[in-house]
Image (cartoon, grey):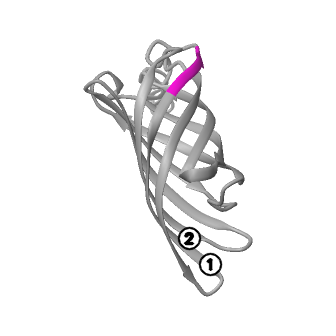
């Protein structure tokens, strides 16, 4: 009797254990990842303070982001966003610690990004690479999340061009 009862309990326990694992829907199971490329044309308004062998950077970037290629339903080819970023950090001889927080606005909807760059300067003629994280948004972009990589080229007169590629989910 004890042997039958233990086998029955094992079967019942196994059923509940496996039902909890296999029967629970995965919220990311049907999440499709989309991609887009973009270009930003902007001007920066940086304040640079020289301290010993590094520079402290603070300021903003304001410009326009245009979507290039895209395969997603949310961010489509040709879409244009107003781009505003708050930038801060420091630039040292062999590394940088630049961060920015950006808002892309299209009508009443917004996309929020963070950005990190660990190499290069902000001098005219410089080209540097970095990464963005899409952390959310408002309106039609409320559930957007993703990652981007970019290259920024600093031009004369505080102008800059950014080319990037992103992967996102919604």
> What is the residue that sits farthest to the bottom in this orientation?
52
Q: Is residue 107 magenta?
A: no
What mark, if any, has residue 143 been given in the picture?
Answer: none
**Mark 2 and mark 1: Cα distance apart in space:** 7 Å
Q: Pick the residue in front: 67 or 133.
A: 67
Q: Quadrant of the N terminus?
A: top left
Vertical order, 120 against 166 (above or below): below
Q: Quadrant of residue 110?
A: top left
Image coordinates of residue 61 in percent, x first then y, are 45, 49
Query: Residue at position x 62%, y 59% from top?
Result: 122
Image coordinates of residue 130 in percent, x first then y, are 63, 49
Image coordinates of residue 57 in percent, x first then y, are 50, 67
The residue wearing badge 2 is: 90
Q: Is residue 115 left or right of residue 23?
A: right
Within-10-Å neighbours for mark 1: few <14, some 14–19, many 20+: some
The residue wearing badge 1 is: 54
**Main secondary structure type of the part rendered in magenta:** strand
Query: Residue at position x 46%, y 33% from top?
Result: 64
Image coordinates of residue 49 in percent, x first then y, are 51, 76
Q: Quadrant of the C terminus?
A: top left
Q: Pick the residue in front: 28 or 140.
A: 140
Element at label 1: strand
Q: Is residue 106 left or right of residue 97?
A: left
Within-10-Å neighbours for mark 2: few <14, some 14–19, many 20+: many
Query: Residue at position x 51%, y 58% from top?
Result: 99
Chain part drawn in magenta: 66-70
The answer to whether residue 34 shows anywhere in this view is no
Vertical order, 51 against 116 (above or below): below
User: Which circle's residue, 2 or 1, is located before the other in the chain?
Assistant: 1
Element at label 2: strand
The answer to whether residue 47 shows anywhere in this view is yes
Asked whether the residues under the numbered discs 2 and 1 touch, taking CB atoms below 8 Å apart as contact, a structural biologist would say yes
């Amino acid at each position: 009797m004890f042997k039958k009862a233990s086998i029955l309990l094992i079967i019942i326990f196994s059923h509940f254990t496996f039902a909890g694992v296999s029967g629970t829907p995965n919220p990311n199971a049907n999440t499709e990842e989309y991609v887009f490329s973009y270009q930003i044309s902007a001007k920066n308004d940086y304040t640079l303070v020289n301290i010993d062998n590094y520079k402290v950077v603070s300021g903003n970037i304001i410009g326009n982001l245009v979507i290039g290629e895209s395969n997603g339903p949310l961010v489509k080819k040709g879409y244009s966003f107003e781009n505003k970023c708050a930038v801060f950090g420091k630039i040292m001889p062999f590394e940088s610690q630049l961060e920015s927080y950006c808002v892309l606005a299209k009508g009443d909807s917004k996309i929020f990004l963070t950005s990190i760059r660990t190499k290069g300067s902000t001098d005219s003629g410089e080209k540097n690479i970095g990464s963005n994280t899409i952390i959310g948004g408002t309106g039609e972009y409320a559930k957007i999340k993703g990652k981007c990589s970019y290259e920024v080229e600093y031009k004369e007169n505080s102008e800059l061009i950014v080319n990037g590629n992103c992967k996102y989910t919604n």
